[in-house]
Image (cartoon, helix red, strand yellow):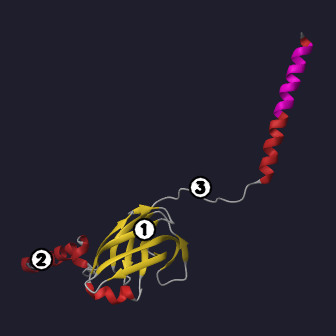
Amino acid sequence: MTSARRAAGLVVILLAMVFVMDPAASSLPAQEAGSVVLDPASGPVGTPVSFVGDIDPSLVAGVRARAYFALIRLLSADCELIVGVSDGVVEVDDAGHVTGSFVVGGEGGCFQTDVTRRATPGRYDLVLGCHACSVGTFEITGSSELPNTGRASVPLVFVALGLVSAGSCLIASARLVDHRRR
């Protein structure tokens, strides 16, 4: 192999490494959807959120048609979770100035599947107008209420009462034996 071929091979390998190591070089250009400020920017499921900002004017028709209005998070290679919002209101003018509000939903579906999942804590993209049109982020935090882990176990209550009764009987009998020895 000549040195020119070696050099050419090395250049090809280096260029391939640049594309692998630099996600911006190997990915499609991001959709310039715009940006909104969410208030609050985090909270548990059920949090009312308001937002204000500007979007690309080319997205105005999709926003008005409510093509997409959701929170999206990549959970795994198999599930990009799309969490619906409730009580959603969006107002947008022709220039792309947008205001609105919504309540964070508690359940969603995995994109292009029939799988549904509960919204889990983490960072979600707010999308308006199209699936790839992220305009802001919201962090779903843990719930302020305890999770439902099952029904109360009535048999365990009876076991606990039985153990308390047995312990009381043992204490009483120990005192009686101690009293007779005196």
Residue 146: numbered disc? 3
Q: Residue at x 46, y 81 (%)?
A: 111
Tell whether position 25 is magenta: no
Tell whether position 169 is magenta: yes
Q: Residue at x 84, y 35 (%)?
A: 166
Compared to 114, does 119 lie above or below?
above
Residue 12 visible to an observer of this rendering: yes
Count of numbered tags: 3
The quarter of the image holding the C terminus is top right
Real-space Cα distance between discs 3 and 1? 23 Å
Q: Cβ–Cβ below 8 Å for labels 3 and 2?
A: no
Label 2: how many residues lie within 10 Å, few (<14), some (14-19) or many (20+)?
few
Furthest-top residue in this view? 182
Looking at the image, residue 21 sits to the left or right of residue 63; the answer is left
Secondary element at image label 2: helix
The quarter of the image holding the N terminus is bottom left
Label 3: how many residues lie within 10 Å, few (<14), some (14-19) or many (20+)?
few
Quadrant housing residue 146? bottom right
Tell me the magenta residue range. Answer: 167-180
Q: Residue at x 38, y 75 (%)?
A: 100
**Residue type at numbered disc 2:** Arg
Q: Which residue is mark 1?
A: 49
Residue 176: numbered disc? none
- Percent across and percent down for residue 176 are 90, 20
**Residue type at numbered disc 1:** Val
Secondary element at image label 3: loop
Q: Which residue is mark 2?
A: 6
**Residue type at numbered disc 3:** Leu
Label 3 vs label 1, nearer the camera: 1
- Percent across and percent down for residue 60 are 32, 86
Compared to 116, does 120 lie above or below?
above
Q: Earlier in the sequence, mark 2 or mark 1?
A: 2
